[in-house]
Image (cartoon, coloured by chain):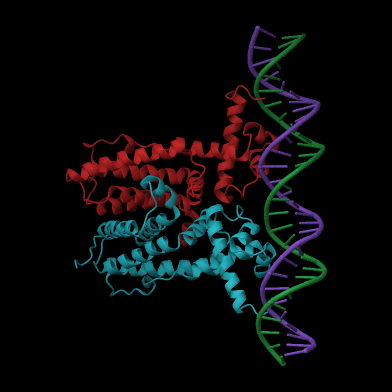
Chain colours: A cyan, B red, C purple, D green
Amino acid sequence: MPVNVSSKISEKNRSIIIAAAERLFASNGFKGTSIKEIADSAGLPKTNVLYYFKTKQGLYHAVLNQILDVWNSRFDQAKEEDDPALTLAEYIYEKMQNSLHNPCASKVFAIEIINGGHNLSDSFLAEHKKWMEGRVTILQSWIDQGKMNAVNPEYLLYHIWACTQHYADFSSQITNLKGKPMKKGDFSQATDELINLILTGCGLSLPKE
Amino acid sequence: MPVNVSSKISEKNRSIIIAAAERLFASNGFKGTSIKEIADSAGLPKTNVLYYFKTKQGLYHAVLNQILDVWNSRFDQAKEEDDPALTLAEYIYEKMQNSLHNPCASKVFAIEIINGGHNLSDSFLAEHKKWMEGRVTILQSWIDQGKMNAVNPEYLLYHIWACTQHYADFSSQITNLKGKPMKKGDFSQATDELINLILTGCGLSLPKE
DNA sequence: AAAAAAGTAGACCGATTGGTCAGATTTGTA
DNA sequence: TACAAATCTGACCAATCGGTCTACTTTTTT
């Protein structure tokens, strides 16, 4: 019976299992991934996976929680006196970096949302809503100060999410169209294009360096 | 043995089954949906579903093909002498209408792409690539004519897709943030916001009416 | 060193699933 | 009406899956 849930071995194995599960859930979905596949991918027997995560759903929730835990940004602490162009550019950059370095996490989250988001905790949903309201307030204050065009802050955020996550979630489509997977340089270019599109669309521009 | 594949009954049942399957695949994914569920939702016994579609994969491919068949747009025939603002606005409008009226189709396609797109036919992938190249050429000609800003046409298209499809695929997240599902009026507003953002971002604007 | 806790692992089970088969029923047509 | 094609359907099956149970080994603690 596992009592000390944070021993060395426990933590190492848990993270190995979660990483393997994240990768497989992203490729085959929750139902499409068997515990045995996760175990094989993690190099452990199936029973061992069940030892650390009592049920498949429990493992899925652990994967989901780890994904959501990492999602914080400098935009979270933006203030009315901050510069919208810099703040938004930085936010877009951060989200693009996440798509580059954590594509599987983005995919698992995307599938979860597409399927209805029934596995997301009420507390996460509430926090997310609160975060959104705070960001809308900041954006609106920037608009009221005449710092940027009067776009609808809510929809602006949706569009930023959509574009940045697209590079992780739809990577297979992009790979087909480009003929090869996007590398760091492509991501850098896409980030520049997106920042330029959004900022220009908001009547903003970055100071030339 | 089904020989005449296009009789009245056959076609009616096939479309009922495909519609039910599309809805369930969008909610639970391919593996997460059982043939029995599809059959129940279609009001038919399971064996009957297998009668029209020999395998579950076959049914899935039928669903996918029906989704892709409908995707054509006025943008497909755009010419160098056309107006970029009107053309792009119309294209965005069409894609938003699709998200409004066919959210399940968008979701099924999204999950397919996220999972790697291994069920898409080579001919579809090739056609899609060809379409893309044609649209990039048109956009580049508009840029060369000085009709719009020198944005990268390829990434511009990605961003349009990402934003428009987001309203179908991520509807559950938006519903949570808004407190209620988006209605026609919300879609109309979102469409206006998106058209304005993209066009402004491209240095374009629609003629005032 | 011994006891306890944590981790590993094989055997096993009930439930579900995709799919088959054989036969009944309905529909179209000459 | 007669016959064949098309449609419908219940019974059935092998395979897979999530999960349990039991027992063994390793690590930690006292």
**On screen, A207 above or below A110?**
below
Residue B70 visible to the viewer: no
Q: Nearer the viewer, residue B184 or B107?
A: B107
Q: Residue B191's x, y, as percent?
A: 36, 49
Q: Residue A82 is drawn in which quadrant?
A: bottom left
Residue A36 visible to the viewer: yes
Q: Residue B39 is drawn in which quadrant?
A: top right
Q: What residue is at 32 percent from the left and 51 percent from the top? A: B155
Q: Residue A179's x, y, as percent?
A: 38, 46
Q: What residue is at 55 percent from the left and 42 percent from the top? A: B22
Q: Residue B76's x, y, as percent?
A: 33, 36
Q: Residue furthest left?
A: B146
Q: Residue B67's x, y, as percent?
A: 48, 39
Instruction: Please state if C18 lies on the left or on the right of B6 as rendered.
Output: right
**On screen, A26 above or below B99?**
below
Q: What residue is at 49 percent from the left and 57 percent from the top? A: A107
Tell me the quarter of the image containing the C terminus of chain A: bottom left
Tell me the quarter of the image containing the N terminus of chain A: bottom right
